[in-house]
Image (tube, helix red, strand yellow):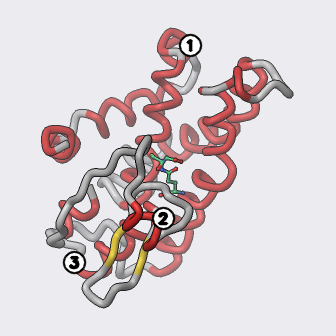
Amino acid sequence: MAIYTAGVKVEHIEVSLKNKPQSLLDYSPKGTVPVVVTANDEVIDQSRDIMLWALHQADPENWLLQNDQLSQEEMIRLVDTCDIEFKPLLDRYKYFDRYTEFSQAEYRLQAEFFLQLLDNRLAKHQYLMNEQIRFADIAIFPFIRQFANTDKIWFTASPYRNLQSWLDKCTNTKLFAAIMENK
Ligand SMILES: N[C@@H](CCC(=O)N[C@@H](CS)C(=O)NCC(=O)O)C(=O)O
């Protein structure tokens, strides 16, 4: 979505994760997608960094809050909290049968700190930073979508009302529809 919004041209090569091509592993031995190889042969293999790479080239909707350094830093910290603290708990909640230390409900409870944190922000404005979609919304909502889809009945009945309507807004954007169509 960041690449699309920035209008950066990329050649998109889909790979089979069950049969990873050697060229992928040569560029990025950890073998996960997405990976960007730039015109200067620089390798970027974290989604967050790929988004920043695209938006630093063009940011027509000011997703990076370029005129407000403090908010920009706060936003990047929020995305890092999602990647570093929330995402491992999401994986445990989703694949609880592979992680036997706690039950699925316990993993969910551990992850709820992040739902609450987002819900509190969304009580103040429609999106995570202000009244418009920004980098943080786009970087975080796919993970909340995965979380919600793990047990839809639980998520719908949960007290995170602001988060629920924000997730609806993010998934109902034209941008998301356009990206999913391109897949
Ligand atoms: N931290 C990486 C995670 C990338 C990642 O785990 N990608 C998954 C697909 S969404 C993958 O390639 N899995 C295949 C594998 O681990 O073999 C990022 O943000 O880009």
| Disc 1 target residue | 154
Q: Kindly identify the residue that appears in the image at 30 percent across and 54 percent down.
A: 132
Residue 108 vs 68, above or below: the answer is above
> If you read the primary sequence from the N terminus, does the residue marked by circle 2 or circle 1 appear first?
2
What residue does disc 2 label? Answer: 46
Q: Secondary structure at mark 1?
A: helix
Tag 2's secondary structure?
loop
Q: Which residue is mark 3?
A: 58
Where is the C terminus found, in terms of image quarters?
A: top left
Residue drawn 53% across the image and 66% down it: 29
- State left or right for residue 40 relative to residue 27: left
Residue 167 on image: x %, y %: 38, 34
Q: Is residue 78 left or right of residue 34?
A: right
Q: Is mark 2 within 8 Å of ligand 1?
A: yes
User: Which residue is pictured at 58% across the width and 41% down the height?
Assistant: 120
Query: Quarter of the image containing the N terminus?
Result: bottom left
For the point 56% across and 13% down, the residue is: 154
Rounded to the nearest angstrom, the CA distance separating label 3 from label 1 is 39 Å
Reply above or below: 88 against 34: above
